[in-house]
Amino acid sequence: MGSKTFDFLIKNEDRTIAVIEVKNRKNLNIDDAKKVRRNIMAHQGLKSKYFVLVSQEYGYVWDNEKSLQLLDNPLISFSMQDIVSRYYKQLNTFENRLRENELELIVAQWINDLVRTKDNHSFLSEPEQKLVAGGFIDTIHGATVISEVQS
């Protein structure tokens, strides 16, 4: 089996904190997201605290230390609409479909902003509030984001 390129890794000096995959399937629902995670986990043997799957409409976060079954529900699910429109103001997210590489650029900017933000109170949108409540943002704070990583 060939090596897999992950879209993003979030790492600190001790470990890989999160693997982030961008799959811009239209209306990626939770059942499809669980299958994507299962396939990646089964074939790649990811060793990270979190697995994050993002589409233009939705984002899903699993805590791999708590979610031991490959088809477990995500710890956090959220709408990506506010995030996509924040970083791409000209886009009407209901009418326009981003190419996957365009969405990857938005996710890269967003994730880099999340790891650099020092104050959780500055996160006002629902997606970030869910990530704060789930402990994700505290865990990734100050870490390094690496793009397109070969395993």
Image: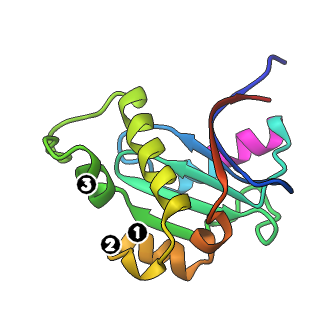
Which residue is located at x 67 percent, y 69 percent? 139
**Magenta stretch: residue 40 in it?**
yes
Residue 47, percent from left and from top:
84, 50
Which residue is located at x 19 percent, y 36 percent? 96
Give the label on residue 86, or none: 3
Quadrant location of the C terminus in the rendered image: top right
State the residue in front, 72 or 125. 125
Secondary structure found at label 1: helix
The magenta segment is 36-43
Residue 135, percent from left and from top:
62, 77
Residue at the spot of label 1: 127
Res. 24 in view: no
Which residue is located at x 86 percent, y 57 percent? 14
The residue positioned farthest toward the top in the image shown: 2
Residue type at mark 1? Pro
Q: Could you tell whether 4 is left or right of 44 in the image? A: left
Quadrant location of the N terminus in the rendered image: top right
Residue 67, percent from left and from top:
76, 67
Residue type at mark 3? Arg
